[in-house]
């Protein structure tokens, strides 16, 4: 297991198409989701939930994505439909992080959404801690109500992201990160 600071210092997103088997075992998936749920949660609302797509379920959900795509693109080529159908099958495991943020007498919705985002980031970091790689993405279908309803989301729920998890097929190169001088100000200086 990598040192926590080293993991956070070196974590790098890996494109879903560059993730392959093996993916996490069922016990590891439970570990990932347990860690993902250990985030700041003002009011203990658990304003997020997870949808796990593994095995054939990835293609079953992909059918719903392809149907929505085909309805919007009647002239789409067969290979485009195949691509859309395989959106959630590019990695061995995909976890949708769902925001359940809702009006509350004390807890602003914005804090609830941030908690869901923290859950997604915890999931990504946990995947790396277990020796896998991950990519947190949304793409068009994360905003399409037809797809969301087909995946079981209620009207007030939104996708924070689809976290693709698997074994990287190659080492990812580091990209430029902003210099601290570009993103940090010190109040009172």
Image (cartoon, rainbow, N blue to C red):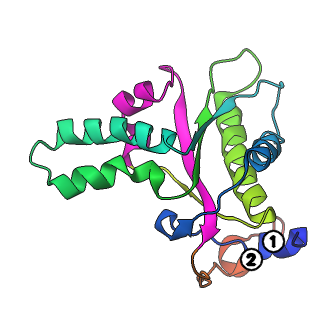
Q: Quadrant of the C terminus?
A: bottom right
Identity of the residue furthest to the top in this view: 105
Q: Residue at x 38, y 52 (%)?
A: 86
Judged left or right of residue 151, residue 41 is: right
User: Percent x, y for residue 112?
Assistant: 69, 32
Q: Which mark is residue 161?
A: none
Quadrant showing the N terminus: bottom right
Above or below residue 53? Residue 167 is below
Give me the residue at 59% from left, 82% from top: 175
Residue 32 at x, y = what percent? 77, 48
Residue 170 shown left or right of residue 48 in the figure: left
- Residue 153 lies in the magenta stretch: yes
Q: Which residues are magenta?
A: 140-168
> Crowdedness of circle 2 by 10 Å Cα count: few (<14), some, many (20+)?
few
> CB atoms at circles 1 and 2 under 8 Å apart?
yes
Give residue 14's quadrant in the image. bottom right
Label 1, on which residue?
Answer: 7
Which is more toward the observer, 23 or 155?
23
Which type of secondary structure does the marked residue at label 1 adopt? helix
**Label total for image:** 2
Secondary element at tag 2? helix
Residue 33 is covered by the magenta coloring: no
State the residue in front, 145 or 17. Answer: 17
Q: Dot 2 corresponds to which residue?
A: 10
Q: Position of residue 43 (x, y in %)?
A: 83, 24
Against 35, is 151 above or below? above
When the figure is inspected, residue 151 is found, relative to residue 89, above or below; the finding is: above
Q: Most extreme residue toward the left, as rendered?
A: 75
- Which corner quadrant of the image does residue 42 belong to? top right
Left or right of 31 on screen, residue 95: left
């Amino acid at each position: 297991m990598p040192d926590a600071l080293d993991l956070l210092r070196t974590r790098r997103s890996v494109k879903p198409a560059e993730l392959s088997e093996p993916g996490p075992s069922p016990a590891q998936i439970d570990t990932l989701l347990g860690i993902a749920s250990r985030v700041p949660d003002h009011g203990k609302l658990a304003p997020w939930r997870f949808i796990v797509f593994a095995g054939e379920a990835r293609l079953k959900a992909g059918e719903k994505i392809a149907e929505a795509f085909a309805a919007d693109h009647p002239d789409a080529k067969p290979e485009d439909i195949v691509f859309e159908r395989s959106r959630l099958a590019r990695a061995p495991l995909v976890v949708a992080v769902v925001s359940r943020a809702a009006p509350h007498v004390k807890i602003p919705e914005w804090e609830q959404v941030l908690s869901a985002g923290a859950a997604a980031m915890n999931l990504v970091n946990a995947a790396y801690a277990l020796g896998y790689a991950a990519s947190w993405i949304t793409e068009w279908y994360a905003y399409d109500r037809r797809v969301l309803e087909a995946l079981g989301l209620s009207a007030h729920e939104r996708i924070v992201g689809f976290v693709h998890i698997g074994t990287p097929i190659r080492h990812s190169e580091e990209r430029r990160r902003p210099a601290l001088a570009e993103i940090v100000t010190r109040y009172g200086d």
